[in-house]
Image (cartoon, rainbow, N blue to C red):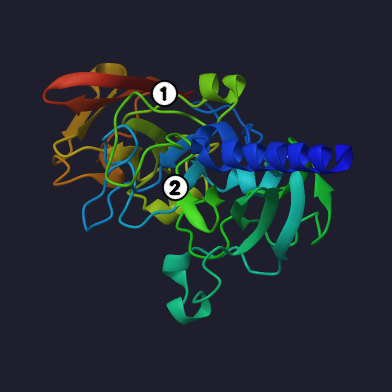
Amino acid sequence: MLRLIILLALAFLLALTLFLVFTAPPGERAPVLSLPIDCVPGQTCFLQQYVDRDPGPDVVDYRCGHQTYNGHKGTDFRLPDTRGVATGVAVYAAAPGRVKGVRDGEPDIFSNERPQSDIDGRECGNGVVIDHGQGWETQYCHMKEGSVRVRPGDIVTSGDTLGLVGYSGRAEFPHLHLSVRYEGQVVDPFAVEAGLGTCGEDTVSMWSDKATAALRYEDALILNLGFASGAVDNRQVEGGVGDGFTLNDETPALVVFARMINAKEGDRLALRIEGPQGFEVSSLADPAPNHQAQRMGFAGRKRPAGGWPKGEYRATVSLLREGAVIERRDISLTME
């Protein structure tokens, strides 16, 4: 009789435990996520896109903004350009778990520079999937070719290095794409308990306190700026064009370029160069026609007939919204 009572008590406790586990809010059952990349958000890396919370054709992020695209299933941590890929930026496990799957060997080639058929079925590029138990898993995509350090079955803890950031798979800029899933369904780590179609500031996050403090919601910002001897495109900016640029008697033109990310409709770039002997040139880019992931602006002038006056040239780039400056950055160079 005593044995029966003990067995019934154990069965009751097991049933109660299962009830509490499966009826608790998802946020109480979710793993706590640490920063999955070796960078300083807002300085050496930037949150480019969040999970798309709209189940239809519109796009909306967890703060009711538009820093995402239709059907986006993760969070993108972007590097300013490919120089970080060359030097190596580590990708970390965001939570403890067991490595479930791995892919490596995909080339780092921007997806808009190769046939889409080469990417079909391998959109994640080089990546890792980690099983955290109780139905939770994370996926890390677009890692650098040959950099993946783990194998299926490996046990990892938070902060263990999985590989390096790259741009393999369907990627148009170097970044880490982090997806979170619960029982196969996409979960927004910034709003783990919110259903699709909902957004707002009052959300339950999966991020640790330290990660939360670092992952502030960023509005549009100037990602790159520099000097060049002519107009440049996104591919050149990704390659670090302007790094080490010098002005000399043979330079055919002096151009300041800037690239912004997360542009809202109507945002525009104002660019200006001022130099010695009254040298001055300015440009106001057209307003963004809609919400755009990235947008560029230029201002420049050809070499004067008498050559470049010697002295300092200072460029100012302003990001404007409804006529107000929301960010301003300066760079300069000297013609000796």
Mark 2 surroundings: few (<14), some (14-19) or many (≥20) residues within 10 A? many
Q: Nearer the viewer, mark 1 or mark 2?
A: 2
Q: Tell me which numbered mark, 1 or 2, is placed earlier along the sequence.
A: 2
Which numbered dot is residue 224? Answer: none
Q: Residue furthest front?
A: 1
* Disc 2: which residue: 237
Residue toward you, 222 or 181: 181
* Disc 1: which residue: 331
Residue toward you, 32 or 267: 32
Relative placement, left or right, of 228 versus 10 is left
Secondary structure beneath dot 1 equals strand
Secondary structure beneath dot 2 equals helix
Q: Is residue 294 above or below residue 278?
A: below
Q: Is residue 195 above or below residue 222?
A: below
x and y percentages locating residue 321 in the rendered image: 17, 26
Q: Residue furthest bottom?
A: 117
Residue toward you, 109 or 273: 109
Residue toward you, 169 or 209: 209
Residue in the picture at 32% in, 39% down? 262
Report which quarter residue 96 is drawn in.
top right
Residue in the picture at 28% in, 55% down? 55
Relative placement, left or right, of 269 versus 150 is left
CA separation, marks 1 and 2?
16 Å
Relative placement, left or right, of 28 versus 126 is left
Quadrant, the N terminus = top right
Total numbered circles: 2
Mark 1 surroundings: few (<14), some (14-19) or many (≥20) residues within 10 A? some
Report which quarter residue 294 is drawn in.
top left
Give the residue type at disc 2: Val
